[in-house]
Image (cartoon, rainbow, N blue to C red):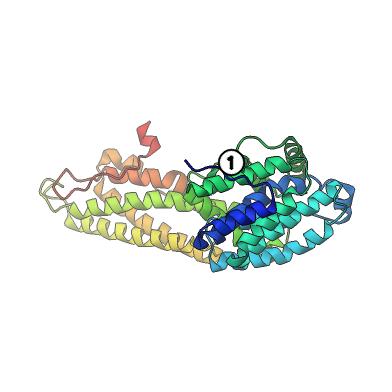
Amino acid sequence: MTKKPQIESDEDLLAWLNARPEGARPIEGAILASRTALRMIPVFIGQLGEDWARNGELVALPVLRSCLISQIAAQRQTPQIREAAAAAREAGRSTTRHSEGNANTGEGEAADAATSADIAIWGVIDAANAPEAAVGAFSYAAGTRTYASELSNEVSLDTHELMRGQQCLRQPLWYKTMPPAIAAEWQSARDWLVAHSGHGFFIRWYEALLEGRPLTDDWDSHWALLTDIALIDSADWGRGAERIDDLISLIAQKHRLQHDISLIHKELENQLFNAQTLGHHRSNLPEDFPVSSVVQFRIALSEAHDALREVEAALEPPIPDAEALDGSIGRLRIAWKKVVKAAKMLIAAAALGAAGELGIQSMGWLIDRGGPIFVRTLRELRPKPSQQERPESGWRDPAIET
């Protein structure tokens, strides 16, 4: 059984990192620096209601941005993330300078929290700095605080998880409970974030961190969402929290669309396969059924499949280009109308009610109603079983299930 290290000082942490495999030090240093800085977020934001912070016109966004990017970099490091880290650090330096004060006051603790975030982001820009960043973030976070022993214990638990090969970033930010002093700061911080519009996402993000859960359905989509947020252009970050909140809403909507489109895409591919069997066997369709209708249906499905791929490609950038996305969606609507027209020629009179509902009105309709109705309609056309038939997709339309 791996014994938990005892990290009680900067020297202890540096010695632990130096004893780790050389290849592991950059990423483990980044993880430790990030989780330390994240634990200090309430200490900074909780002081923003004080006179000294108001007089300095301090805001939460630069520290939140640095901590979010440091968290992403601890999970996936790319040149784009490093560029975002460098820009975030440059933008956040003024926050660090303006929050400097007496170390025996809340102002001093807020300054140390901001510095901890600044050091964590420094460790992202150059991976070689990560071990020193971990030590520096820990040094500024612990200091002579009343919660220093609890913070030391959390870092010790982080190192233990890393030694055991566990997913440290999926653990609650505080393994047991937040120290009372920081819990009180978080309540003040949360009140400040609620009172200042544009911070709703960051409240949800931080509470998910505290609980050790993803913001989305799974960790892969969680990291994909945060990566796109981290890559928002610096000019937009400089326009304030409400602008960032608008962009995060767009990014979140994009990810929901990607998820739903992927489900529809899988079902569409399944139906494409099935459509190829229509008319290949005497049992598939009546003998007098016009083959041209079957051909038109196959062509329409193929065009819809290609158009759906265009939409997927247009959704790839962190923030999709509105013009490119609108063009792709327009082509998808046209393609789906052709599918509807061809389907109406194939579906028996009893199924025309479902087909008649397929008027493509908007992208929201496509995801909320269009996909399920489209799939339900196509199921009416599924050929009788043959050796060429593939198993059904695993997706089920909830409307059909009920």
Which of 34/134 is in front? 134
Does residue 362 appear in this view?
A: no
Report the quarter where the C terminus lies. top left
Which of 175/110 is in front? 175
Residue at 40% x, 47% y: name it: 371
Considering the numbered disc 1 on the image, is that residue within a helix, a strand or a loop? Answer: loop
Is residue 340 found left or right of 250 in the rendered image? Answer: left
Image coordinates of residue 365 in percent, x first then y, are 47, 47
Task: Please say if 89 is above or below 71.
Answer: below
Task: Please say if 327 is above or below 294.
Answer: below
The part of the image, by quadrant, that contains residue 111 is bottom right
Label 1, residues with CA under 10 Å away: few <14, some 14-19, many ≥20: some
| Amino acid at dot 1 | Pro
Residue at 22% x, 59% y: name it: 295
Image coordinates of residue 120 in percent, x first then y, are 66, 58
Is residue 13 found left or right of 110 in the rendered image? Answer: left
Residue farthest to the top? 402
Image coordinates of residue 34 in percent, x first then y, are 63, 53
The part of the image, by quadrant, that contains residue 239 is bottom right
* Residue on which disc 1 sits: 172
